[in-house]
Amino acid sequence: MRRLLPSAAAVAACVLVVSACGGGGGAPAAPPAQVSDPSKVSGEVTWWDTTRPDSEGPTFQALIKEFEAKYPQVKVKYVNVPSDQAQNQFQTAAQAGTGAPDVIRSEVAWTSQFASLGYLQPLDGSRAVDQAEDFLPGPLSSTKYDGKTYAVPQVTDTLALIYNKRLLKEAGHEEPPRTIAELKQTALDVKAKTDAEGLALNVDAYFLLPFMYGEGGDLLDVTSKKIVVNSPANVKAMETVVDLMSSGAAPKPAITDSYANAMTALKEGKVAMIYNGPWALSEIYQGKEFQDKANLGIAPVPAGSVKAAAPTGGWNLAIYAGSKNIPAAYEFVRFMTTAEAQAKIAKEISLLPTRTSAYSNPDVQGNADVAVFKPIMDTAVPRPWIPEGGQLFQPLLEGYQGLVNGKLTPAPMLQKVEEDYRAIMKDWS
Amino acid sequence: MAVSTGKATAAGGPARGRSDRRGRRRERPGPLRRSLGTHWYAWAMVAPVIAVMLVLIGWPLARGVYLSLTDATEANIGRTIGVNVIPATYEFVGLENYVRILTSAVFWDKLVWTVIWTVVCVALHYGIGLGLAVMLNRRMRFRSVYRVLLILPWAVPAFVAAFIWRYLYNSDYGVINGFLKLAGLDGVGWLDDPTTAKIAVIAVNVWLGVPFMMVALLGGLQSIPADLYEAAEVDGASAWQRFRAITLPGLRQVSTTVVLLGTIWTFNMFPIIFLVTRGGPGSETEILVTYAFREAFTGIRDYSGSAAWGVIILVMLVVLAVGYRRTLRNQGDPW
């Protein structure tokens, strides 16, 4: 019934609009590309959203209502697809030619892959992109493939150190750790002086990147097309991770359901620190330790011996090339990526805007989480936006799991990862 | 009907009597024609089924085999989507995919584990299922209640079972480790170590598969005439002798069928592995089908490679089934 009401309202609105325009009558429908008045665009836009339906979804659904009020002839069909399944489902549907949505919320790393397979509508010069120069360069770079634009940045994110202020204080630390050495010491102090553990590691390839960047390492060197994962810097980074586990600073993490276990441990005050991104904040605030939001601390990821840096993540909005409602989809993407829409998202669920101008909005400035994350974003490292990007994580994940259960040591692990990369990127050196 | 078509197929082989056809036919129709004349209704009734089978099974199978001989991937298979036109550029590459798979270490690793997984699972399915069936075949109170309870796991969809078990196994918050900790023991990272993860997935699959075996064998048990047991008892046969001489031979028909079915199902038991461990840790619990799926559905999909995996798995199962039947027939089984 809840779904029916808005659609009934939309139908009623359509009827009103049509009867109001009735007097003019007889004007031939303009070709979709040259719609003079965007509010006259009509159609049904199916949108695959990948946010968490309970904590983040309602904000986006409220935005959709605003959109439908502004564009009364467009109906938006909201479909929530779990973020770990959306990529696969979209590929299947797009390839089959049926069931693909008009608009998909595409992770930054998927965009170039979808584009290379011909699934996305090129957006250069379309109404979907408004003031491209306003977008932050990192997220914007993820929307390009082969010199063309295939998506519009919706939200951006990166990893940070998220911690429980009370536990750190009990352990005698007012300030969050700034370096890996401090991180280890702080974690050990928490373990010694409180009944909680220090750091919960999430056994996921993406969460290894801050350690690698921190030592000056990386997975690939895109400009010279080289696979650089098996570098001394990365070996050192992996040794750091192993040391955190073997020293007891981080309890041996679960491999299966690692992310969920780390989050639960933080929410229940069983662990003091985790690495995670802004997308996790609305879920963390549901935990009993953070009923008082002030107890949650957010700091840049601790620095390795070279620098402190975490990967650029985030989500873009892209349009399926086979969509029957491209003009309406353009308007929808445009609307969802305005500075106002981004400010609303930032205000309510702390997801970071991709527009420079949005950061001067009082709603955004008023959000403490965003204020903390903004400077962290400025040092975030864009990943290689290549179609194969999505395949780079599985070998790294298997290696990480080997490190955790003690079957592998850093050097052989990276050697194995390198071999797997060579099979994926055949023409790289 | 089945019998008549069987005859027709057997008779419709090489056309005989090439010379003087017309003359002979007028006197005595050839075997094919005669069979068609007599059994035309059977052919007419079977024809739609054959047509549907060809469309539903034959075509995808032929297409799969063809794809496995090319280098088709998601990127080069060719399509037109809206303004994007991508020409088909895949080529016929012969047996290259098969050579690549069969010469890779990973294939043999996965094959060994798949065989262990299948043999252990089916042995436990059969053994436990038989034990429960024998128990439930006796007269006892609440027998039907026990039967319903024991069938329950079978009624639970595999993916639900997988998620429940995954939660039970959780190393920090799982029920199993909860009990271990209550007993003062250390928790075990059930799904995090290759050995315990393998035990864990086998346990889930056994839990899921036993009810089917139990029901099938119970049906078999009930078809064994009770007077055989009475006669054996009169002759002074012990319980074990009765079990070996009457129960096992009496179950033979059912057993051979369910063991073959169980083997094929377990060999291809995708959801348990995929949902409980995702093939992890590393790719230690990955069986052939889940590995093939991962090959096919991560990143840019490799249609030709996954088709080759599929054909290899199919061929292995066909060889297994044919060999199994032949062995049984040599032992005098009418199946």
Image: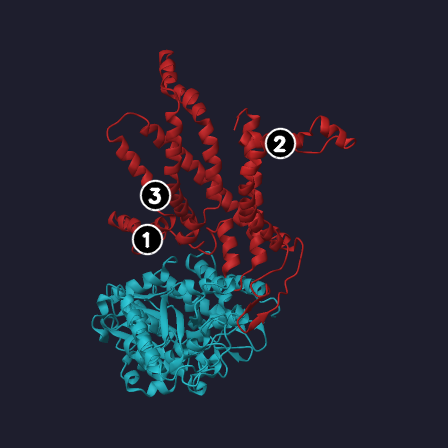
Chain colours: A cyan, B red
Disc 1 marks which amino acid? Tyr
From mark 3 to mark 1, how far is it between C-alphas?
Answer: 19 Å
Tell me the chain of label 1: B
Viewer-proximal residue among A287 and B324: B324
From mark 2 to mark 3, how far is it between C-alphas?
Answer: 48 Å
Task: Identify the disc placed on residue B167.
Answer: 1
**Sequence-first disc among 1 and 2:** 2
Residue ID for mark 3: B155
From mark 1 to mark 2, how far is it between C-alphas?
Answer: 64 Å
Residue ID for mark 2: B37
- Is residue A231 toward the left or the right of residue A179 in the image? right
In the rendering, at what x and y percent does residue B34 appear? 65, 30
Disc 3 marks which amino acid? Ala
In the rendering, at what x and y percent does residue A399 appear? 47, 61
* Residue sitting farthest toward the top: B235
Residue B135's place in the image compared with A375, above or below, is above
Q: Residue at x 33, y 63 (%)?
A: A262
Q: Are discs 2 and 3 located on one and the same chain? A: yes
Viewer-proximal residue among A312 and A228: A312
Task: Identify the disc placed on residue A402.
Answer: none
Viewer-proximal residue among B67 and A212: B67
**CA neighbours of label 3 inside 10 A, class few (<14), some (14 to 19), many (20+):** few
